[in-house]
Image: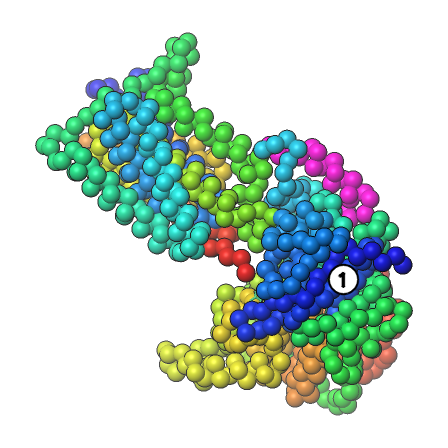
Amino acid sequence: MEKEKIIEMRNIRKTFLNNVANNNINFVVYKGEIVSLLGENGAGKTTLMKILYGMYTKDSGEIFVNGRKVEINSPKDAIALGIGMVHQHFTLVRTLTVLENVILGLPSPKGINLDFDYARKRLEEIIQRYGLVVNPDAKIWQLSVGERQRVEIIKALYRNINVLILDEPTAVLTPQEVEELFKTLRIFKKEGKSIVFISHKLEEVMEISDRIVILRNGVVTGERRKEETNARELARLMVGREVIEVLREKTSVTKRSPLLKVKELKALNDKNLVALKGISFSVNKGEILGVAGVAGNGQRELEDVICGVRKPISGHIFLDNDEISGKSPKEIIRLGVGRIPEDRMESGLILDLPLYENLVIEFYDKPPFSKGMLIDYKNIKRFAQKLIKEYRIKTASIDVKTRTLSGGNLQKVILARVLSQSPKFIIASQPTRGLDVGAMEYIHEKLLEARNNGAGVLLISEDLHEVLNLSDRIMVMYEGEIMGIIDRSKEKVDIEELGLMMAGAKRRKVS
Amino acid sequence: MNTGFWTLTFWVGFLAATVRMATPLIIATLGETFAERSGVLNLGIEGMMIFGALAGFLTTYFTKSLWLGVLVATLSGIAFGWLMAFLTVTLTLSQHVSGLGITIFASGLAYYTYRAAIGSPTVPPTIKAFSTLKIPLLWKIPIIGPILFDQYAITYIGILLVPLAGYLIYKTTFGLSLRAVGENPEAADAMGINVYRIRYTALIIAGGLAGLSGAFFTLAEFNMFLYDIVAGRGWVAIALVIFANWIPSKVLWGALFFGSIDAIGLRLQGTAIKVPFQVYLMLPYIFTIIVLILIARNASYPSALLKPYRRE
Ligand SMILES: Nc1ncnc2c1ncn2[C@@H]1O[C@H](COP(=O)(O)OP(=O)(O)OP(=O)(O)O)[C@@H](O)[C@H]1O
Ligand SMILES: [Mg+2]
């Protein structure tokens, strides 16, 4: 492999208040390679890449591009140097079309006038060449997550970049979409472009990378060529200890007592199409019911309806024989439902509030956090302090704006809040998306602990691994219907059958 | 005029008045559209209009030049637009407080300047205001001619500004950046757009147009400066932006609608229908409230409206 350095970052340091996010990091990208940045939540990966992309200003250190020392003060500078970035949280304008988003901020060949014809031609070329299929005239809000990501990549390509930074691009993708993404990335590499890939999924990292750099607490703790390492070693380098996969130990359920009963539930999605076609199932006390299925088959709507943020058209939901459909989200929380929402940025957290308020936001008006009409901030802060310690939430303090936490740590905030209330029923949607292996292990332990203490858990996850490791029963959803429920106390899971059910090609009788 | 409202003369007069009364609303609302598209609610608009009315009047009063008056009014608006940008964009202060502060300050300054320059005579001094500009040939077209082609020069400018604003917003790189900044400034920033510069530009446009709109009152509609000459038209413009869904072409229709309500009052005062004239003065504001009730709930506000932008 030829070793032409395209980017070299030397002694990069960045602190936020008293929190050292990058502590004298050295990082190199070679031409035509895929290098992965690996590290725990809050290790400083996003920060390092945002410095390279001109979104954060470094405290000290130097950056060289093609051997020349450069100052990158804004994304504009970075783009001019051939560096593009797809962010962990997308940066698209929802109300604009794909085409408009792609040409946003670029000078037009026609001066002040936009040149849509030219842009469309180039866009189609890129779509063709890299297989990034998307409709140029669709508005962003109409697109699926996978499509949005393609738009982000197209945006970077349109700017003729040589180095593409992808910050957790696969966290929100289905396995098929990941495969397509990897195909695109390989075409890139063949063209001599370089890629910085950030992911917590070790199998993916092992599949796609040439080289892996590991960060811990803001310093580089290791570097490996793909051939000389394995997932196990990477996990250890990342977390600093041996990581084990958490598996549920079988419980010998003698008597099942249903906790949550869903009857003939029908609901619409945001586009007013029927998303749940009259489904019925129940979740028992002390069990995890895993919902497997490709995203967009009604899981989201199911989550919303159970939590009271979406009104069903018909049907019933009972929790311990109390009807909860039609109740407000607040009442439902009161009745003992804990929600770990899929969309943590929009429905899980209020990003501009301080961290300690987000940690109690679902129950700040109950004792011991409030006495009558008065909020007891002392108690809240003590509680918050306890939670960030217990859940190892990485932050400078509990007073920071919640927005400043790293992606994975935001997820931990929600989990800490929900689990601290020991709810009797937990609905967890993609609970470990974006979490590092150590944090994932911890969350899995916590969910199993809740289940062993008698809680019922509805686990919605696209990560089949997670569903298989944790669930007592597995329910497969396809196009708003239940394709079948596999009871693992009675049978072994046939992965092939599961796949067929997820694809809608096989249906079982649901009793 | 003792014509009833069933005659053709009445309707032609009414529609011509509608276009005339709509003029300041068209101009001010287009300006506000730019401000809000960039994510800033410009509540300073009322004050900017009042100050523009004064600045235009005084300039013309002392120089006898109407066009110089128009220019100075516009420039005064630009200055206040820049101030609004400094407060809300650079200092990231509350847009509500800054806007209301500017309105109070600008209107107070206008009254003060008037007193200082003119004193308080029993009869307010007047200027020779714009007279209507008949567009050759076109004004002779029956019915249409007197309605559309026998108007003040500023009215023609206002109407031409509508397609121009539409062009700027939808067809230029500036417009695309503007829309992006008002919806998602983080995304715009990530694409190398200077969020601050776009917001400054938008507010300067908004201020300039507010000043120009104010000048219409003192240099065309009337020929003097009165304390309540703008009479809340700035607030109507704020409502009109919502009515128009932040789209310039709809601003035109909305402004004409409100202009017609103003014109009805004006016309009906001369007819046999006897209602206290204050009722007519109330009409536009009553309609403003009704329109907001009907429309505002479903309005698609620019997502970043009211949110200051700071980069880490
Ligand atoms: N804008 C900010 N203000 C204050 N602190 C910040 C800011 N951005 C990041 N941090 C802090 O810097 C540290 C590193 O964050 P960073 O986002 O780089 O982590 P990461 O490695 O990308 O983690 P994840 O895998 O969870 O995305 C974290 O402790 C985070 O709280
Ligand atoms: Mg990150």
Q: Is residue A398 above or below residue A131?
A: below
Of the 4 image quadrants, the one containing the C terminus of chain B is: bottom right
Q: Residue at 21%, 19% (x, y): give it.
A: B1
Secondary structure mostly taken by the magenta-highlighted segment of the chain? helix
Q: Splitting the image into 4 quarters, where does residue A200 fall?
A: bottom right
Residue A259 rendering spot, x and y as whole percentages: 64, 81
Q: Residue at 54%, 79% (x, y): give it.
A: A335
Pointer 1 indicates a residue of which chain?
A
Residue B6 rendering spot, x and y as whole percentages: 30, 21
Left or right of A365, for residue B4: left
Query: Magenta includes B53?
Result: no
Residue B151 rendering spot, x and y as whole percentages: 35, 20
Q: Residue at 77%, 59% (x, y): give it.
A: A29
**Relative to the observer, which residue lies in front, A303 or A326?**
A303
Q: Splitting the image into 4 quarters, where does residue A99 fall?
A: top right
Q: Secondary structure at mark 1?
A: strand
**Relative to the observer, which residue lies in front, A372 or B306?**
B306
Q: Which residues are magenta?
A: A113-134
Residue B10 rendering spot, x and y as whole percentages: 29, 20
Q: Residue at 12%, 29% (x, y): give it.
A: B123
Q: Which residue is mark 1?
A: A28
Colour logic = rainbow
**Residue A262 can be seen, yes or no:** no
Kindly identify the amino acid type of the residue bearing the numbered disc 1. Val
